[in-house]
Amino acid sequence: MRFKEFWEVASSCKNLWGSIPGFEESIRNFALHAINLTFSSIHKTKLGETLSLSGGALDSLIKDQCANAGWAIDNDVVTLNNNIKSQLSKTKGGEALQLSQLRSLINT
């Protein structure tokens, strides 16, 4: 993820996007979505860098996510409620393609 770099560049042109209502919040929501798709847990410092938040603002977001999205925090590690580990370990029978299904594609 390159959100940290984005925030660094964005801070130099804040006068451009500062007038766009909801811009910063939209970027943070996108970053949160990417974090939820990517991590099952994340260090609080990394989360703060990714969202360009620190101190009370970061603590408030984590508290809100714990209450509303099922996150948990233990020391400085935030555990997300996205079940990535269990989804990756599941094997679903019947999803494997058979060679006979691919023959029409191969012969084309």
Image (spheres, rainbow, N blue to C red):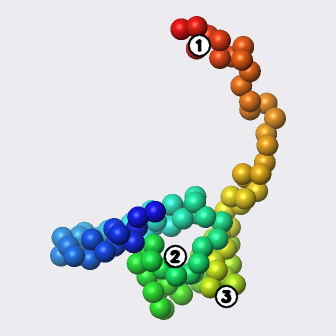
Give the quarter of the image for residue 81.
bottom right
Q: CA distance from mark 2 to mark 1?
A: 45 Å
Which of the pair 101/82 is nearer the observer? 101
* Image side of residue 4 versus residue 58, left or right: left
Q: Residue at x 31, y 74 (%)?
A: 8
Q: Residue at x 51, y 76 (%)?
A: 46
Tell me where residue 47 appears, x and y as whole percent.
Answer: 52, 76
Q: Residue at x 18, y 76 (%)?
A: 15
Q: Nearer the viewer, mark 3 or mark 1?
A: 1
Circle on res. 75: 3
Tell me where residue 1 appears, x and y as whole percent.
Answer: 46, 63
Say whether disc 3 or disc 1 marks the residue closer to the N-terminus: 3
Residues packed near mark 1 inside 10 Å, few (<14), some (14 to 19) or many (20 plus): few
Tell me where residue 7 appears, x and y as whole percent.
Answer: 34, 73
Determine which residue is flagged by label 1: 106
Hey, what amino acid is under mark 2?
A: Leu
Identify whether 72 is placed above or below 23.
below
Residues packed near mark 2 inside 10 Å, few (<14), some (14 to 19) or many (20 plus): many
